[in-house]
Image (tube, rainbow, N blue to C red):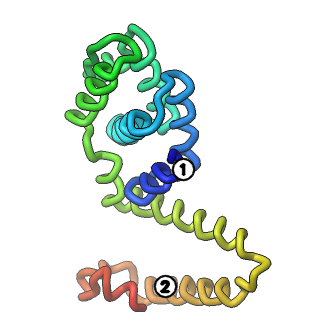
Amino acid sequence: EARAFADELQKTTTYADDVTLSAMALISSMTRLSGDGLNKATQATADLASGLGIDLESAASLVSKTLSGSMNALGRYGIQVSGVSGSTERLASLTDNIAEKFGGRATADTNTFSGGVKQLKNNIDELLEALGDVENRGAGSYVKALNSMIIKAKEFLDATSGKSLIDKGYSEKSLLLL
């Protein structure tokens, strides 16, 4: 279940699935959360990391300390949390208050150029992992086709002279057909 959640988070944020799994492991080990509670805490962690401009592991540490302890490690960032340590009330308070301040930020980061590039890198890494898994099953022609597509994309970008592709009349859909 954690793997599936990390895969989904990678599709909608700039966080790679392996980084998300590491953050989930930290949260789970310090709080004993699992399932839906762990997923909610992880989503809040991703939004917190994006909102504060910190790495996911550091955000996971702050969230874990706040959930498992009597201190609020997030207080200095203006996020108040109530409820007894380890309680569902504390989890709800934490996720609600992070959402109020930074809700959707991890997803919104993918709409920036640097966020889009980071997400692209994560997806390319995933593709390379998948190619490694099928290496001995005749993936050579697939690799050649991908290389050809990348070369054509680079040539296309060179030909546009750095001008906005939207200004040139291209939409995302038409770019996928190149």
Query: What residue do we see at 61% from left, 89% from top?
Result: 145
> Quarter of the image containing the C terminus?
bottom left
Query: What residue do we see at 20% from left, 34% from top?
Result: 100
Question: Mark 2 or 1 closer to N-term?
Answer: 1
Could you say where residue 53 lies in the image, as x and y percent from the top left? 39, 38
Foreground: 155 or 71? 71
Q: In the shown orientation, is residue 54 left or right of residue 105? A: right
Q: Amino acid at mark 1?
A: Arg
Q: Where on the picture, by quarter, is residue 157?
A: bottom left
Query: What residue do we see at 31% from left, 84% from top?
Result: 173
Q: Amino acid at mark 2?
A: Ala
- Between marks 2 and 1 in the image, the one whose residue lies nearer the viewer: 1
Could you say where residue 38 lies in the image, as x and y percent from the top left? 43, 35
Could you say where residue 128 lies in the image, as x and y percent from the top left? 64, 69
Give the class, few, some or many, for how many residues have Cα within 10 Å of label 2's Cα (few <14, many ≥20). Answer: some
Q: In the shown orientation, is residue 132 left or right of residue 53? A: right
- Examine the rendered structure and indicate whether residue 9 appears above or below residue 126: above
- On residue 153, the disc is 2
